[in-house]
Image (cartoon, grey):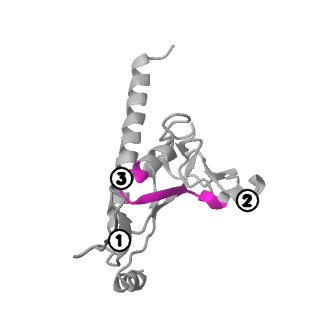
């Protein structure tokens, strides 16, 4: 990556790229099935970052070319984890309850707008910076032809600087979803049983 960026910098040009983000150990059940789907909230946050031009999650656009019989993330049981380690509920005999997982993760850890316990993974596309050292033709508001040539130091690629921003925006979205889930659970507990 560094060599490619240096090549374009030496040409007084710029280049774009993608940032891949992976979230591990995300709680199951974050998000909503309709208006606040977690993937929609992540896309909203990522596309709010300057210079972004695309977002895909899981198999992304590649999933368009795969039949559903191959692309579907079939559910399966996973080995149980001891409740003392995870805080999961126990069966009456004290053993851990088996948990569900999927055989594949084409959905990128979110199904129907809600996290499923698998790794969440997505990519964010960043365009090439527009400000470059090469002379570029332009036109003023008065329809006068001109030349635009940037001087000074400009980043030939924003991708290295974007990594911590993508991570921070992801953390904000996930914490917001977690707080929303906590509020729902608290409200439910206040209703009591009927």
The answer to whether the residues at label 1 and label 2 have Cβ atoms under 8 Å apart is no
Q: Residue furthest left?
A: 152
Which structural element holds mark 1?
helix
**Which callout, 1 or 2, points at the residue further toward the start of the chain?**
2
Q: Is residue 174 rendered to the left or right of residue 104? A: left
Q: Is residue 155 magenta?
A: no
Q: Residue furthest top?
A: 194
Mark 1 Cα-neighbour bin, 10 Å: few <14, some 14–19, many ≥20: some
Label 1 to label 2, Cα distance in Å?
A: 32 Å
The answer to whether the residues at label 1 and label 3 have Cβ atoms under 8 Å apart is no
Considering the image in quadrants, where does the N terminus appear?
Answer: bottom left
Q: Residue at x 33, y 63 (%)?
A: 164
- Horizontal and vertical percent for residue 182? 39, 34
- Horizontal and vertical percent for residue 93? 57, 40
Q: Which residue is mark 2?
A: 66
Q: Is residue 18 above or below residue 114?
A: below
Tell which of 154 and 189 is nearer to you: 154
The answer to whether the residues at label 3 and label 2 have Cβ atoms under 8 Å apart is no
Residue 132 seen anywhere in this rendered image of the structure: yes
Q: Is residue 106 above or below residue 182?
A: below
Q: Is residue 61 magenta?
A: yes
Q: Which mark is residue 169?
A: 3
**Which callout, 1 or 3, points at the residue further toward the start of the chain?**
1
Q: Which residue is mark 1?
A: 160
Mark 2 Cα-neighbour bin, 10 Å: few <14, some 14–19, many ≥20: few
Magenta span of residues: 45-62
- Horizontal and vertical percent for residue 17? 45, 70
Q: Is residue 56 rendered to the left or right of residue 85? A: right
**Which callout, 3 or 2, points at the residue further toward the start of the chain?**
2
Tell which of 185 and 160 is nearer to you: 160
Quadrant location of residue 2?
Answer: bottom left
């Amino acid at each position: 990556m560094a060599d490619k960026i240096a090549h374009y910098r030496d040409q007084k040009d710029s280049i774009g790229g993608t940032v891949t983000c992976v979230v591990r150990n995300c709680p199951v059940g974050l998000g909503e099935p309709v208006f606040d789907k977690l993937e929609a909230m992540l896309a909203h946050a990522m596309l709010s970052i300057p210079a972004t031009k695309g977002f895909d999650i899981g198999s992304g656009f590649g999933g368009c070319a795969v039949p559903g019989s191959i692309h579907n993330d079939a559910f399966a049981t996973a080995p149980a984890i001891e409740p003392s380690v995870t805080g999961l509920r126990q069966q009456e005999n004290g053993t851990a309850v088996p948990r569900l997982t999927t055989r594949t993760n084409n959905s990128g850890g979110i199904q129907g707008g809600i996290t499923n316990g698998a790794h969440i993974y997505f990519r964010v596309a960043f365009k090439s910076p527009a400000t470059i050292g090469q002379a570029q033709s332009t036109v003023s508001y008065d329809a006068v032809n001109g030349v635009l040539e940037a001087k000074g130091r400009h980043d030939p690629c924003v991708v290295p600087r974007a990594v911590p921003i993508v991570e921070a925006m992801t953390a904000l979205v996930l914490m917001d979803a977690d707080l929303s889930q906590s509020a729902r659970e608290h409200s439910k507990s206040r209703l009591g049983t009927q």
